[in-house]
Amino acid sequence: MQAVVKINAKAGAAGTTVTKVPKPEPGPGEVRVRVQAAAICGSDRHIFHWDPSVRHMIHPPRVYGHEFCGEIDVVGPEPDRDDLQPGDYVSAEMHVTCGRCTPCRSGQAHVCERTQIIGFHHDGTFAEYVIVPARNVVRLPRDVVPLKIGAFLDALGNAVHTVQDHPLIDARVAVLGYGPIGAMAAAIADHQGAGHIYILDVSERAIEQAEQWRVGLGASGVTVLRTGGELTAEATRRILEETDGGVDLVLEMSGAEAAINQGLEIARGGGSLSMLGIPSSEGITIERFARHFVFKGLSMQAITGRRMFSTWEKMLALLADGLQVGSLVSHEYQGLEEFTDGMDAFDSHEALKVVFYPHGENGHA
């Protein structure tokens, strides 16, 4: 089969190739899925560029990719499930957990101490077929989840997890970082009735994309603000003034130290911060910690992955209810041959989501 393979410890196209590899065979408790659509994630970019943050997780050669949907091709022996059949339309939770550690045994498997990730520790979804544990498979409704959305449910699940514990009706929400997941979180907040959404980013291209979404939405309840450097103080002042003290919920998607500090400042007393962004360095400095966090009585929640499997159920319910995120896909490729072109579009922020159809013709052979 054809696949995108990280072939060595080199950055860029020198370390990644599209080539033929053996079709994998499912073992006990596994299924083989025919990949109909797969999307680029920010972590795939780290693999492509061989960034230090992922090197300890990847041992080339490795087929990468972990956002996908497809049809079950073969159900392996002893699947321990009787609801999976060849031809079923599915995706899967790609964090493979141990089931034995304290988080797993207390209903918090999304923070399993021994998590393995398909596309990192095991061969992934930038391929015509992928092997996944049967217990991780999520069956999808064809009339609710088209292929180009099914391709990035993993990322959409991150966005859903970021907001799912917070009341959003009439809430004032700030989204810090309008990358793919920030864009999804903004769409979810709007869909669930947020009173006003502030979108902040330092990138001119991201601001343009957020403005396009705001205009397309045709709603007055979204404000897009450029931040960073000398613009930060003005954006902060405006939000605090317009909200009479701060927003109810901050969704921090960037991991940037300045954004985290701005998020603490623009949250109202008693408000909440949901933290998905990962800083590029090991440590960050929190300014005025007592004033902006302790004395304001803020709640802060760290987000990793998706809750298994309540986030998936919430996500599918939102899509069935009409959540619109398909417009995030701007680049679609019939096959995997143009993987580097798709990565270039993602890298340059020209595209928020890039989707490949490994079998061509939008996933159909």
Image (spheres, helix red, strand yellow):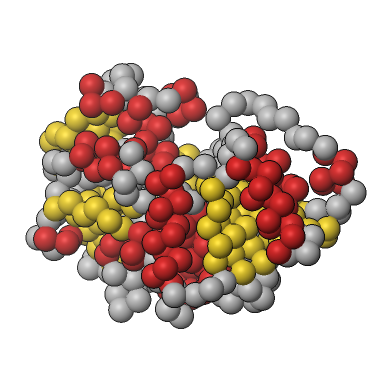
Residue 120 rendering spot, x and y as whole percentages: 40, 36
Residue 278 rendering spot, x and y as whole percentages: 57, 38
* Residue at 42% from the left image edge and 39% from the top image edge: 43
Q: Quadrant of residue 162?
A: bottom right
Where is the C terminus found, in terms of image quarters?
Answer: bottom left
**In front of the other: 215 or 102:** 215
**In front of the other: 215 or 296:** 215
Picture layout, residue 284 above or below residue 204: above
* Residue at 35% from the left image edge and 27% from the top image edge: 49
Q: Is residue 233 left or right of residue 64?
A: right
**In front of the other: 287 or 83:** 287
Q: In this orientation, does residue 199 appear?
A: yes
Q: Is residue 265 left or right of residue 277?
A: right
Residue 96 rendering spot, x and y as whole percentages: 47, 46
Q: Outermost residue toward the top?
A: 9
* Residue at 32% from the left image edge and 22% from the top image edge: 11
Picture layout, residue 204 above or below residue 29: above
Where is the N terminus found, in terms of image quarters?
Answer: top left
* Residue at 55% from the left image edge and 53% from the top image edge: 225
Residue 237 rendering spot, x and y as whole percentages: 71, 52
Q: In this orientation, does residue 310 appear?
A: no
Q: Is residue 299 left or right of residue 233?
A: right
Count of numbered badges drawn on the protein: 0
Picture layout, residue 186 above or below residue 354: below
